[in-house]
């Protein structure tokens, strides 16, 4: 006699009760099934092979699950916004990733702006070279360069309430000069009290 199979499945909504960080899985409490708590259900991911994506819901979030006919196995399709957890934006042009610690990564396809806002540190680490290709770059805070600084198109600035530049160590110039209000360090002269004329240029 040929064995029959029941391939039915049900869509259920429930609350995330527990999270398994290592297995990327959750257990969900289902009100429609007398608050039955599911077995561990894998959470659907955008990618899980060579390219991988890792993101888990928190306990208490409203989950959508696809379960087998007996309710013993299935998957968590994801979580949805609801009255308790409202959507963080109301603009279809915005892609946003918002974290519970206040960090927000956002792209507005209407303006083209990409923003990263975080209360913590940001680390960019590369085994090669990092290139910033733009018309203008602005740094609003202090800037520390631990390695050698090379610039190709000159340098200008002001000192605010202090000196424009303070250098600890020897300053070398090659093939150029140092000017202070138009006075050349290399070419300036001094009155020669002995001859009554001027001294020669600095050597």
Image (cartoon, rainbow, N blue to C red):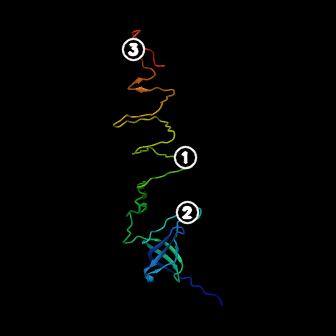
How far separated are the C-alphas under marks 2 and 3?
A: 76 Å
Secondary structure of the residue carrying tag 1 is loop
Tell me the residue that label 2 is attached to. 52
How far separated are the C-alphas under marks 3 and 1?
A: 53 Å
Q: Is residue 96 among the parts visible in the rendering?
A: no
Q: Which residue reaches farthest right? A: 1
Between residue 120 and residue 49, name the one nearer to us.
Answer: 120
Residue 168, how many percent across, how many down? 45, 34
Say whether marks 1 and 2 touch (CB < 8 Å): no
Between residue 7 and residue 39, name the one nearer to us.
Answer: 39
Residue 126, how many percent across, how many down? 54, 50
How far separated are the C-alphas under marks 1 and 2?
A: 24 Å
Q: Earlier in the sequence, mark 3 or mark 1?
A: 1
Q: Earlier in the sequence, mark 2 or mark 3?
A: 2
Relative vertical location of residue 31 with respect to residue 145 in this rendering, above or below: below
Tell me the residue that label 1 is attached to. 129
Please give the name of the residue rendered at 47% of the width and 76% of the height, measured from the top-left corner.
Answer: 28
Relative vertical location of residue 154 with respect to residue 113 in this rendering, above or below: above
Please give the name of the residue rendered at 59% of the width and 64% of the height, measured from the top-left corner.
Answer: 49
Between residue 106 and residue 180, name the one nearer to us.
Answer: 180
Secondary structure of the residue carrying tag 2 is loop
Between residue 62 and residue 165, name the one nearer to us.
Answer: 165
């Amino acid at each position: 006699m040929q064995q029959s199979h029941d391939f039915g499945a049900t869509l259920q909504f429930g609350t995330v009760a527990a999270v398994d960080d290592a297995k990327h899985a959750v257990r969900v409490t289902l009100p429609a099934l007398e608050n039955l708590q599911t077995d561990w259900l894998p959470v659907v991911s955008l990618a899980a092979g060579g390219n991988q994506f890792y993101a888990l819901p928190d306990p208490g979030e409203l989950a959508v699950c696809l379960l087998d006919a007996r309710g013993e196995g299935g998957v968590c399709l994801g979580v949805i916004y609801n009255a308790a957890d409202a959507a963080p934006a109301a603009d279809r042009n915005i892609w946003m990733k918002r974290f519970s610690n206040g960090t927000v990564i956002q792209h507005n396809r209407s303006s083209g702006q990409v923003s990263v806002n975080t209360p913590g540190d940001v680390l960019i680490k590369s085994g090669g070279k990092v290139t910033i290709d733009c018309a203008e770059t602005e740094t609003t805070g202090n800037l520390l360069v631990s390695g050698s600084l090379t610039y190709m198109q000159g340098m200008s600035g002001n000192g605010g309430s202090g000196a424009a530049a303070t250098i600890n160590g020897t300053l070398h110039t090659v093939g150029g000069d140092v000017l202070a209000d138009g006075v050349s360090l290399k070419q300036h002269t001094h009155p020669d009290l002995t001859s009554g004329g001027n001294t020669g240029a600095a050597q």
